[in-house]
Image (cartoon, helix red, strand yellow):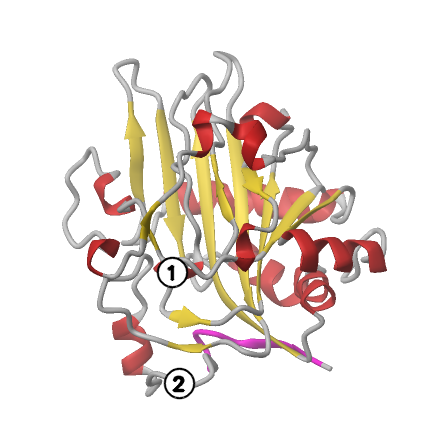
């Protein structure tokens, strides 16, 4: 399969990613990569990890399935991490000399699901600290802009610590050992109500086809995907990439996903570069 993107990352893409914190990249992955990930998703859903859970289940039985860090047990995911153009895309956008893989996550909504992803930033939840990060959001089926993930451009530059959502509350099945966060003790402000006035915040989203992707800095405000028509579902595969300035951190407010135990077991401590089998270095320039 093609290890390079179907088109190069242009200088304008890099400038947009740096300035806005998010860039839409149409037609980057060929059909073979999409089919590989769809096969991996079937395996993942049939054999979910211990970190999987349902984020939402409505009265009609429609659900939103979530799983993360499945790449070590799903061969198709692993091949994508090591062989696909994703690491190159992330490196180009971050202008990074070193790129490590952090983790994968999948989001699968049943047709007609109305659940919307709460607005949030990613990096404050993570067991790493740093600005040089890139998440790649890939739909495996067509998705309309109004149902896709949405973003507040340039919000990655804010230094404010917001009181963000506890995704551990999204647990209708009452699973134990779900990661929890509580930003209340450290928050400087409430998280803005983006949905109340999306035009004021300049919210952006895009119609997308399989092979397209959105790349965004992990400090971007994003959310809102979902609210699907009755005959439309959504399957999304995401990968998280770490650039040059990222180091391990254990946050007192909690982390989601919480990598504390696996990091400590691997000998990693706060301030270390995430490396090793859990966080493989995929690219060095």
Q: Are marks 1 and 2 in contact (CB under 8 Å)?
A: no
Q: Position of residue 44 (x, y in %)?
A: 43, 47
Rendered residue at 49%/72% (across/down): 130
Q: Position of residue 173 (x, y in %)?
A: 18, 35
Q: Is 91 contained in the magenta span?
A: no
Q: Position of residue 259 (x, y in %)?
A: 32, 68
Up/down of 58 relative to 264, above or below: above
Between 16 and 99, which is closer to the camera in this rendering?
16
Between 126 and 83, which is closer to the camera in this rendering?
126
Report which quarter residue 143 is drawn in: top right
Q: Position of residue 111 (x, y in %)?
A: 46, 19
For label 1, the SS is helix
Q: Is residue 181 visible?
A: no
Up/down of 11 relative to 48, above or below: below
Magenta highlight range: 276-284
Report whether 93 appears left or right of 274.
right
Q: Residues within 10 Å of mark 1 (few under 14, many from 20)?
A: many
Label ID, residue 84: none
Q: Residues within 10 Å of mark 2 (few under 14, many from 20)?
A: few
Q: Earlier along the polypeptide chain: callout 1 or callout 2?
A: 1
> Label 1 to label 2, Cα distance in Å?
16 Å
Q: Is residue 270 visible?
A: yes
Report whether 111 appears left or right of 190.
right
* Residue underneath mark 1: 124
The quadrant the C terminus occupies is bottom right
The quadrant the N terminus occupies is bottom right
Label ID, residue 271: 2
């Amino acid at each position: 399969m093609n290890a390079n993107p179907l088109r190069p990352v242009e200088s304008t893409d890099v400038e947009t990613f740096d300035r806005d914190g998010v860039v839409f990249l149409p037609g980057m992955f060929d059909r073979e990569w999409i089919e590989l990930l769809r096969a991996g998703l079937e395996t993942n859903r049939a054999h979910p990890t211990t970190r999987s859970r349902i984020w939402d289940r409505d009265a009609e039985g429609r659900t939103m399935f979530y799983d993360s860090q499945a790449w070590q047990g799903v061969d198709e995911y692993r091949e994508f991490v090591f062989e696909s153009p994703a690491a190159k895309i992330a490196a180009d956008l971050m202008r990074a000399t070193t790129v490590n893989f952090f983790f994968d996550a999948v989001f699968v909504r049943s047709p007609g699901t109305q659940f919307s992803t709460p607005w949030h930033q990613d990096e404050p939840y993570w067991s790493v600290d740093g600005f040089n990060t890139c998440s790649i959001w890939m739909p495996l089926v067509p998705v309309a802009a109004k149902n896709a993930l949405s973003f507040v451009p340039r919000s990655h530059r804010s230094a404010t610590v917001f009181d963000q959502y506890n995704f551990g509350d999204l647990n209708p099945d009452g699973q134990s050992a779900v990661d929890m966060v509580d930003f209340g003790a450290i928050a400087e402000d409430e998280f803005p109500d983006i949905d109340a006035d999306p035009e004021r915040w300049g919210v952006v989203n895009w119609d997308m086809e399989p092979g397209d992707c959105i790349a965004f800095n992990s400090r971007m405000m994003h959310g809102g995907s979902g609210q699907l028509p009755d005959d439309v579902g959504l399957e999304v595969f995401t990968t998280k990439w770490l650039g040059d300035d990222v180091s391990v951190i254990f946050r007192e407010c909690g982390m989601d996903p919480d990598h504390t135990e696996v990091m400590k077991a691997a000998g990693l401590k706060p301030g270390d570069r995430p490396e090793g089998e859990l966080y493989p270095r995929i690219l060095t320039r």
